Amino acid sequence: MKRWRYGGPVHRLIVRSQHAQLVVWTGDEGPIPASVGAIGVEYRGRLGHPSSYGLLVGRVAEGRDGTFSLDPTPGTLAVPGEHATLGLTEPEYRGALGAANAMLGGGLVFTGIVEGRYGSSTVVFAKLTAVLCVLLSVGAEVVEESRLWATWDEPWRARSPHPAE
């Protein structure tokens, strides 16, 4: 696991197995930049599996309503074994992100999304939304790896990054 100094940019590679890893970052330390206050998380699973890739960048919203604040310019990202597109091109993924955000209590603004032509799925994006909630609640520098994988396995147990009212 690679970490930078506390308070600065973060980049963590969190490996569960050779076929499951999460990359967590802040700032310019990841595949795409995360703006101030945002955290990025990328999942890479077994090549060829229908739920093997996804990437989200997000921050806490001002209110509880989740929103999308995405660059409308599509692009591509180099991902081995995948044709990854920067942006949200599949309507079903937008629906999955919105539903997951609502189920978790809302309060996320998605600022970056990368979907894979072969390996993305609504399941991947729902799980990434839950992991992002945990990262924003606890902090990318300090959250335990076991907590992230437990959230991946049971995403409905995560909660909104907003403090309890």
Image (tube, grey):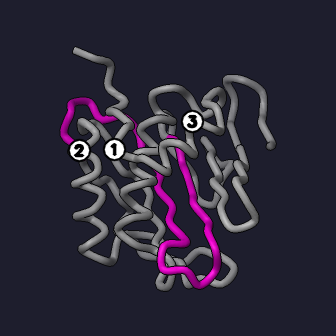
Please give the name of the residue rendered at 55% of the width and 80% of the height, measured from the top-left corner.
49
Amino acid type at image mark 1: Trp
In the image, taking residue 3 as reference, residue 31 lies left or right, namely left
Q: Residues within 10 Å of mark 2 (few under 14, many from 20)?
A: some
Which element carries disc 2, helix, strand or loop?
A: helix
Q: Mark 2 and mark 1 in contact (Cβ < 8 Å)?
A: yes
In the image, taking residue 41 as reference, residue 159 lies left or right, namely left
Q: Looking at the image, is 42 positioned above or below residue 74?
A: above
The residue under label 3 is: 147
Front residue of 53/16: it is 16
Magenta residues? 39-66
Mark on residue 156? 1
- Residue 153: x %, y % from top left: 49, 51
Q: Looking at the image, is 165 positioned above or below residue 94?
A: above
Please give the name of the residue rendered at 45% of the width and 53% of the height, measured from the top-left corner.
128
The residue under label 2 is: 103
